[in-house]
Image: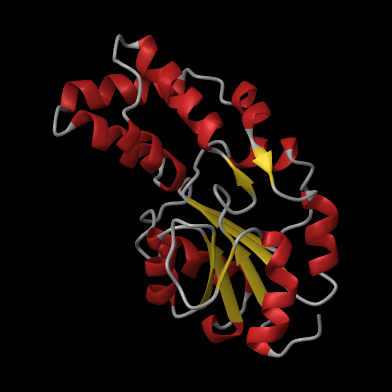
Amino acid sequence: MIELVIFDADGVLFDSTESNTAYYNAIFAAIGEPPMSPQEERAGVFMAAPQVFELRARGDAELLARMRAAARGMDSTPFFKLLRPSVELRPFLLDLKRRYRVGLATNRSATIPALIDFLGLGGVFDAVASARDPVRPKPAPDIVELCLERAGIDAQRAVYVGDSETDRIAAEGAGTHFIGVGARVDHAHRIETIAELPATLARVFRAPA
């Protein structure tokens, strides 16, 4: 029986490609770096910011330090306007909470409190874990495990909903079930958007729809 549904943020609750690309390009422009490559744009959806910076730096410690400094001075909230949720998130999640507890486990870091507020999701999540916590980012299982710990739920009674192989690997490492969202992840239980999630939970785990 599933008691806890844990969501990734980017690519699951919303399409953040445009938002993340604009954010990182603003940081790169501030230090005289060229815009993101197509590879970096794809990585920016599921990687934590430190991972994106390391991908760009390619071992250049001085460049990495400059990117981190620029990020600390960058206001991320204007970029939230470019997020594209696939459903009206608050009513969707509150309806889901009639049957399950809900959590958030994401590689986002310092932006999480402001993001939750911007999306109108204050008080919705029963547990939140992110890369701002002192844990390894996904694909390590730490963020998912921390969310489970904060919710007080056993891994086998939880399902992680993610959009990438990074998420699938993290779920497997944490011992939770997994449902994939979108085309970036290959899994037996895959949906196009979270609008399909309630019916999929009911079908896969034989829970009430």
Tell which of 201 and 62 is nearer to you.
201
Residue 77 vertical position relative to residue 192 in the rendered view, above or below:
above
Instruction: Identify the image quadrant of the N terminus.
Output: bottom right
Q: For the point 44% across and 23% down, which residue is it?
A: 72
What is the quadrant of residue 43 in the picture?
A: top left
Q: For the point 67% across and 76% down, which residue is it?
A: 200
Residue 131 vertical position relative to residue 152 in the rendered view, above or below:
above
Query: Looking at this rendering, what residue extends furthest in the left direction?
Result: 59
Q: For the point 54% across and 86% down, which residue is it?
A: 156
Tell which of 112 and 133 is nearer to you.
112
Instruction: Identify the image quadrant of the C terminus.
Output: bottom right
- Horizontal relation, residue 169 to residue 93: left or right: left
Tell which of 186 and 88 is nearer to you.
186
User: What is the number of callouts on the image?
Assistant: 0
Residue 19 vertical position relative to residue 155 in the rendered view, above or below:
above
- Horizontal relation, residue 68 to residue 133: left or right: left
Residue 22 x %, y %: 50, 23
Residue 133 x %, y %: 47, 51
- Horizontal relation, residue 60 to residue 116: left or right: left
What is the quadrant of residue 129 in the picture?
A: bottom right
Which colouring convention does the figure follow?
A: secondary structure
Residue 199 x %, y %: 74, 76
Q: For the point 42% across and 20% down, which residue is it?
A: 25
Residue 105 x %, y %: 54, 58
